Image: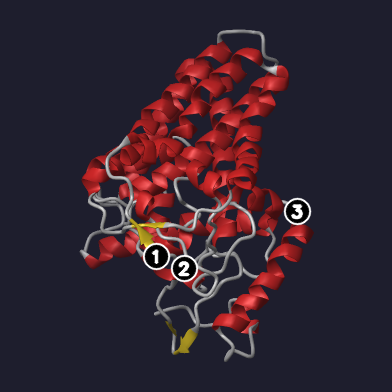
Amino acid sequence: MTPSATPETGPVPSALPFWLSLGLIPLAVFVATQGGWALLLLPLTTWWLFSGLDYVVGLDKVNPDPATPERALFWHRLITLLWTPLQLVAIFGVLHYVVNTDHLTRGEAWALFAGLGILSGTIGITYAHELMHQKPKTERWLADILLASVFYSHFRSEHMLVHHRYVATPRDPVTARYGESFYRFFPRVLYQCFVSALGAEKAMLARKELPATHLSNPFWRYLALQLIFLGLAAFIGGLWGVVLFATQAFWAIFQLELVNYVEHYGLTRKHLGDGKYEHVKPRHSWNASQRASNWLLINLQRHSDHHYKPDRRFPLLQTYAEDEAPQLPYGYPVMTMMALVPPLWRKVMHPRIRDWRAAFYPEIRNWQPYKYTQNPMPR
């Protein structure tokens, strides 16, 4: 790991690059007013612009001091707190504008909300992920609101109760299997993650001797928030408003699961026997040090450290060298586009997985039980 550097404490400049995402809000408004060629701007900005910036500004391998006090992170935290109301105003404001003007065709309106879904998936769900891991209730509520706005509230339960505990084992639906294409992964996780989240919350309540239908089950909160957003979309735009809002939600979920696919693809924890697995280590997540895409994704690509220290705030996440964690060749925007082309994905990733196996687990000769999830479920 690169030696820690003392971060700038408190000032705006150290946090400023992470605020670039705010520029996507006025861009969304501009796209809505223009239509036509401008509809390409949201996906081009999130996927291509930051990939190009990665090429220009390179890698960031310097680690901040993890003992930095929270008061020094005010400007970093503020962007995650502001994004929730800004995203809601943008989505529902654009929805109101679109259904009350006639300069966009129905196809253009659909494309616009698909682009907004890329925005709410790339930024909104990433920020929700940061917020749900924090202790203050306000932040966790903001996470719930963001997830409800894309009809994916159960992600919080699945992520916190299942994914972090069972990552890189057969019990984790979100760990993409070696050789599994994204087009197989996506429908699988849509079903398995929902069932897994329900089961995890039911088990939590059972330990308290409470039924799954108890009001403390967060699924009631998830349902209420999602119905509020569904009702608001219907109030603003009727059935067409619901269709457009659901389009935004679908592409946000699609974007999230593309990232999930990349983060742990082909990586597995060693089975120690009798349903026991080694502890989670940085080697069980793909790491990426691309500077610009980490600005966009608030250091989500330092995913190896996130799984090592899940509640560590994003400005303090550490990056790792190749002898500690596997490295992606590009940032998430490029890797997620690559995942949409399975032959290209396999060509790039499978040699890296074989190298990872040889480097970290030379003693394992038979990888078939890992590849086909034939190892026992973790205890």
**Disc 2 marks which residue?**
167
Could you give the CA–CA distance between mark 1 and mark 2, rounded to whole angstroms? Answer: 27 Å
Q: Which mark is residue 72?
A: none
| Scheme of colours in the image | secondary structure
> Which amino acid, mark 1?
Pro
Q: Position of residue 290 (x, y in %)?
A: 56, 52
Quadrant hosting residue 107: top right
Quadrant hosting residue 211: bottom left
Is any atom of residue 152 visible in this view?
no
- In the depicted structure, whether residue 204 falls above or below residue 75: below
Q: Position of residue 158 (x, y in %)?
A: 42, 57
Q: Which mark is residue 3?
A: 1
Q: Is residue 76 left or right of residue 377?
A: left
**Residue for point 24% across, 67% down:** 207
Q: Please state which of residues 10 and 275 is positioned toward the viewer in this rendering.
A: 10
- In the depicted structure, whether residue 310 falls above or below residue 48: below
**Residue for point 59% across, 37% down:** 46
What crowding class fits label 1: few (fewer than 14 Cα within 10 Å), some (14-19), or many (20 or more)? few
* Label 3: element kind: loop
Q: Is residue 371 left or right of residue 13?
A: right
Dot 3 or dot 1, earlier in sequence: 1
> Which amino acid, mark 3?
Val
Q: Position of residue 108 (x, y in %)?
A: 69, 21
- In the depicted structure, whether residue 75 falls above or below residue 133: above
What crowding class fits label 3: few (fewer than 14 Cα within 10 Å), some (14-19), or many (20 or more)? few
**Disc 3 marks which residue?**
341
* Label 2: element kind: loop
Dot 1 or dot 2, earlier in sequence: 1
Q: Position of residue 20 (x, y in %)?
A: 48, 33
> Which amino acid, mark 2?
Val
Q: Please state which of residues 91 and 378 is positioned toward the viewer in this rendering.
A: 91
What crowding class fits label 2: few (fewer than 14 Cα within 10 Å), some (14-19), or many (20 or more)? many
